[in-house]
Image (spheres, rainbow, N blue to C red):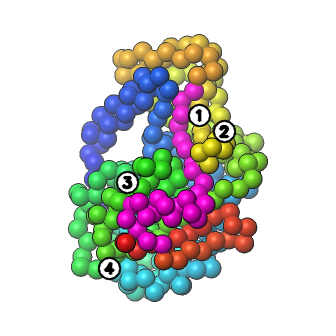
């Protein structure tokens, strides 16, 4: 497995990013740090919940349209998947693309990625599988060179919604610069009833809360942190003005925590903002895609218009 970032460099980046975010007046941590091995498995459990509509809705769209995507040039070349996770949705495309030569999944969770890549290798023995343990939000310049094949980028899960609008456009621009001839299939969640969203991100079983609080456990494990998990509560908030669900960890009392030798103070009710999940209308996403240098060539949605899968080409 190719490692884009060394474990040592990743550990340093994690420490520096966590401390920088928690020493701000309004504490914030990038959502990418939620996805260590434990967090990745917890997220897979979330996707199985009845209340969590995005995964099953996106899968239903892909099931109906996978054969249509076969017309894209990359379906006969190399498919690069960003944030592949368990690669469950990937099978729908791999089954529909019999002429695909290379599959390159990219994910920040190395162990989770390795297991998923091995499963794909067993299921598709004629396919060259090249897993890359990397943070795809960083520049793509050090990725392994692909053969002279057309490229299809698969970016499912509405992961684009985790970024601020300007960051999402910048990421799409980076992808376009790295793979300028590629096509892009991307999943995007849409605005909907606030209660549906609230239930999806704060399930009664507490799995989403465990996923969120695992960030504190990770800091304790990797940065000698002293977080008391019982002293922080998972909180999901629908921010109407920004059209996004926000996940926070709220301090239940005034307290101090030590992280990598640094002391961080929390007031009662103060939160760590851990994730955004933006919900984009067609017009809103078209604006982001255009800013990132892409043109929408097709869009497929479910019967409720809860979720969309877009096909993009470099503008």
Measure the C-alpha gap from mark 1 to mark 4. 41 Å
Q: Nearer the viewer, mark 2 or mark 4?
A: 2
Of the two numbered discs 3 and 1 on the same chain, state the one appearing first in sequence.
3
The image's mark for residue 248 is: 1
* Residue ID for mark 4: 150
Q: Residue at x 23, y 68 (%)?
A: 145
Of the two numbered discs 1 and 2 on the same chain, state the one appearing first in sequence.
2
Q: Which residues are magenta?
A: 271-296
- Residue 234 in the image: state x and y as whole percent: 64, 33
> Which of the 4 quarters of the picture holds residue 80?
bottom left
Of helix, strand and loop, which one carries label 3?
helix
Measure the C-alpha gap from mark 2 to mark 4. 41 Å
Q: Nearer the viewer, mark 3 or mark 2?
A: 3
Q: Residue at x 45, y 17 (%)?
A: 264
Q: Residue at x 63, y 64 (%)?
A: 307
The image's mark for residue 170 is: 3
Q: Nearer the viewer, mark 3 or mark 1?
A: 3
Of the two numbered discs 1 and 4 on the same chain, state the one appearing first in sequence.
4
Measure the C-alpha gap from mark 4 to mark 3. 23 Å
Q: Nearer the viewer, residue 227 or 293?
A: 293
- Answer with left or right where residue 184 lies relative to residue 233: left
Measure the C-alpha gap from mark 3 to mark 2. 26 Å
Where 215 sits versus 2, above or below? above
Of helix, strand and loop, which one carries label 4?
loop
> Which of the 4 quarters of the picture holds residue 120?
bottom left
Image marks 1 and 2: residues in contact by CB distance under 8 Å: yes
């Amino acid at each position: 497995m190719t490692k884009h970032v060394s474990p040592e460099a990743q550990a340093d980046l994690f420490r520096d990013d966590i401390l920088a975010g928690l020493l701000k007046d309004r504490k914030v941590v990038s959502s990418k740090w939620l996805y260590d091995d434990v967090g990745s498995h917890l997220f897979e459990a979330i996707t199985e919940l009845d209340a969590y509509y995005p995964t099953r809705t996106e899968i239903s769209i892909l099931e109906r349209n996978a054969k249509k995507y076969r017309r894209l040039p990359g379906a006969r070349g190399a498919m690069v998947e960003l944030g592949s996770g368990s690669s469950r949705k990937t099978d729908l495309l791999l089954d529909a693309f019999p002429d695909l030569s290379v599959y390159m999944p990219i994910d920040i969770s190395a162990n989770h990625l390795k297991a998923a890549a091995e499963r794909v290798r067993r299921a598709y023995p004629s396919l060259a599988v090249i897993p890359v343990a990397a943070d795809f939000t960083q520049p793509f310049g050090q990725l392994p060179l692909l053969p002279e094949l057309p490229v299809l980028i698969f970016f499912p899960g509405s992961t684009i919604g985790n970024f601020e609008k300007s960051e999402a456009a910048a990421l799409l621009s980076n992808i376009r610069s790295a793979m300028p001839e590629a096509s892009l299939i991307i999943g995007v969640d849409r605005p909907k009833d606030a209660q549906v969203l609230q239930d999806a991100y704060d399930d009664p079983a507490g799995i989403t809360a465990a996923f969120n609080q695992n960030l504190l456990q990770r800091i304790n494990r990797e940065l000698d942190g002293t977080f008391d998990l019982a002293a922080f509560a998972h909180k999901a908030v629908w921010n109407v003005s920004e059209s996004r669900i926000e996940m926070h960890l709220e301090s239940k009392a005034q307290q101090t925590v030590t992280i990598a030798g640094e002391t961080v103070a929390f007031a009662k009710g103060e939160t760590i903002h851990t994730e955004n999940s933006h919900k984009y209308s067609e017009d809103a996403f078209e604006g982001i895609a255009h800013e990132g240098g892409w043109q929408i060539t097709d869009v497929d949605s479910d019967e409720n218009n809860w979720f969309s899968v877009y096909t993009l080409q470099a503008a």
